[in-house]
Amino acid sequence: MIKKVDHIGIAVQSLEAALPFYTDVLQLELKGIEEVESEGVKVAFLQVGETKIELLEPLNEESPIAKYIEKRGEGIHHIALGTDSIEERIEEIKAKGIKMINEKAKTGAGGAKVAFMHPKSTGRVLYELCEKKGERE
Ligand code: ZN
């Protein structure tokens, strides 16, 4: 089942420039910074209750985040729904006619299994399914 909004992904030009708002003004806890080479991004996670904010900085021009910022500017990029049994969720969602960007889960930040739905199928919202390792509530 889908259980919660795991995190909200926000595209930023620079983590260094964006972080002080979150850590100093909002005083959110910085959980960690990690490079996800496969996605061409450097991510920072900030805890907000049981949800997180994921800041995404492009590592290179080829990064989907670089392309996103070029087209639309910085801002909200995706909403991640925390789920268990991600493979089953993907099959269920596909069976209901929703197009997936990732037909198979891939490894994202923090070793989570993730898969994105196609925004054309979801009213133009980029939704990520995300299953955390060892987080079975
Ligand atoms: Zn995400």
Image (cartoon, grey):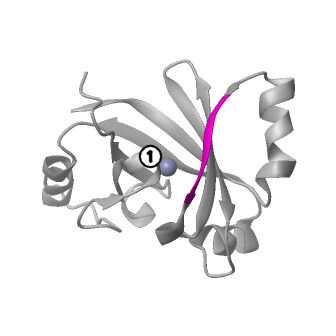
Say which quadrant the C terminus sits in. Answer: top left
- Is residue 31 shown in magenta? yes
- Is residue 27 shown in magenta? no
Give the crowd class for mark 1: few <14, some 14-19, many >=20 residues within 10 Å. Answer: some
In the picture, measured across the screen, residue 119 lies left or right of residue 40, that is left
Which residue position holds label 1? Answer: 110
In the picture, measured across the screen, residue 58 lies left or right of residue 95, that is right
In the picture, measured across the screen, residue 120 lies left or right of residue 10, that is left
Say which quadrant the N terminus sits in. Answer: top left
Q: Which quadrant holds residue 57? A: bottom right
Q: Which quadrant holds residue 82? A: top left
Is the CB of mark 1 within 8 Å of ligand 1? no
User: Which residues are drawn in magenta?
Assistant: 30-35
Which residue is found at the position 67% from the left and 70% from the top? 59
**Where 131 sits versus 70, above or below?**
above
> How many numbered tags mark residues here?
1
**Where 97 sits versus 10, above or below?**
below
Which residue is found at the position 68% from the left and 72% from the top? 66
Where residue 89 appears, x then y in whole percent?
Answer: 19, 47
Which residue is found at the position 51% from the left and 37% from the top? 7
Where residue 84 appears, x then y in whole percent?
Answer: 22, 37
Amino acid type shown at disc 1: Gly
Where residue 52 appears, x then y in whole percent?
Answer: 55, 32
User: What secondary structure do most residues of the magenta stretch adopt?
Assistant: strand
**Where 120 sits versus 28, above or below?**
below
Q: Determine the secondary structure under disc 1.
A: helix
Residue reaching furthest bottom?
Answer: 62
Which residue is found at the position 39% from the left and 39% from the top? 81
In the picture, measured across the screen, residue 17 lies left or right of residue 131, that is right
Where residue 11 appears, x then y in whole percent?
Answer: 68, 56
